[in-house]
Image: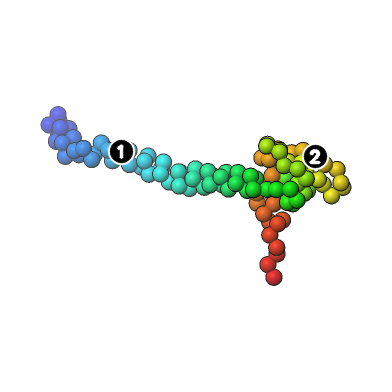
């Protein structure tokens, strides 16, 4: 009985103990490439887009409000709405996808 266990352990060798962790390593790699990496890229694109906005650009906020940038500060924008009133919003409240769709001309 003990000899059988020792023979099985010797036959497994070094690869036998590492093969148990292979599925876990593969799950981590897949999780990184399909979940973490795209999210980091999206955050980077959002940050770059917000930093490139300037006075006069039309934006849509995550709350759904539409407006035109009247003033740019370090961490916020002063947005002028269609009704003429101005409101200050944080830069993080600008929606990347909605604002890009607003500013791109429709394809004919």
Tell which circle, 2 or 1, labels the residue nearer the N-terminal end. Answer: 1
The residue sitting at 12% across, 31% down in the picture is 3
Image coordinates for residue 42, horizontal then vertical, percent: 56, 47
Q: Quadrant of the C terminus?
A: bottom right
| Label 1 sits on residue | 20
Q: Is residue 66 visible?
A: no
CA–CA distance in space, label 2 to label 1: 58 Å
**Towards the viewer: 26 or 87:** 87
Tell me if residue 107 comes above or below residue 20 in the rendering.
Answer: below
Q: Residues within 10 Å of mark 2 (few under 14, many from 20)?
A: few
Image coordinates for residue 24, horizontal then vertical, percent: 37, 39
Tell me if residue 94 comes above or below residue 7 in the rendering.
Answer: below
SS assignment at label 1: loop
Q: Quadrant of the N terminus?
A: top left
The residue sitting at 87% across, 47% down in the picture is 83
Left or right side of 25 for 51: right
The residue positioned farthest toward the top in the image shown: 2
Q: Is residue 55 visible?
A: yes
| Label 2 sits on residue | 87
The residue positioned farthest toward the bottom in the image shown: 108
Left or right side of 74 for 15: left
Q: Residues within 10 Å of mark 1 (few under 14, many from 20)?
A: few
Q: Tell me, what colour scheme is on the image?
A: rainbow
Image coordinates for residue 61, horizontal then vertical, percent: 72, 45
Left or right side of 21 for 107: right
SS assignment at label 2: strand
Image coordinates for residue 88, horizontal then vertical, percent: 77, 38
């Amino acid at each position: 009985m003990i000899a059988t266990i020792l023979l099985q352990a010797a036959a497994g060798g070094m690869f036998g103990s590492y093969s148990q962790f292979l599925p876990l390593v593969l799950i981590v790699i897949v999780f990184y490439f399909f979940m973490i990496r795209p999210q980091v890229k999206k955050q980077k694109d959002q940050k770059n887009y917000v930093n490139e906005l300037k006075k006069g650009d039309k934006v849509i906020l995550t709350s759904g409000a539409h407006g035109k940038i009247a003033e740019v500060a370090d961490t916020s924008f002063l947005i002028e709405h269609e009704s003429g009133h101005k409101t200050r919003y944080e830069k993080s409240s600008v929606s990347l996808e909605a604002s890009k769709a607003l500013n791109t001309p429709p394809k004919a």
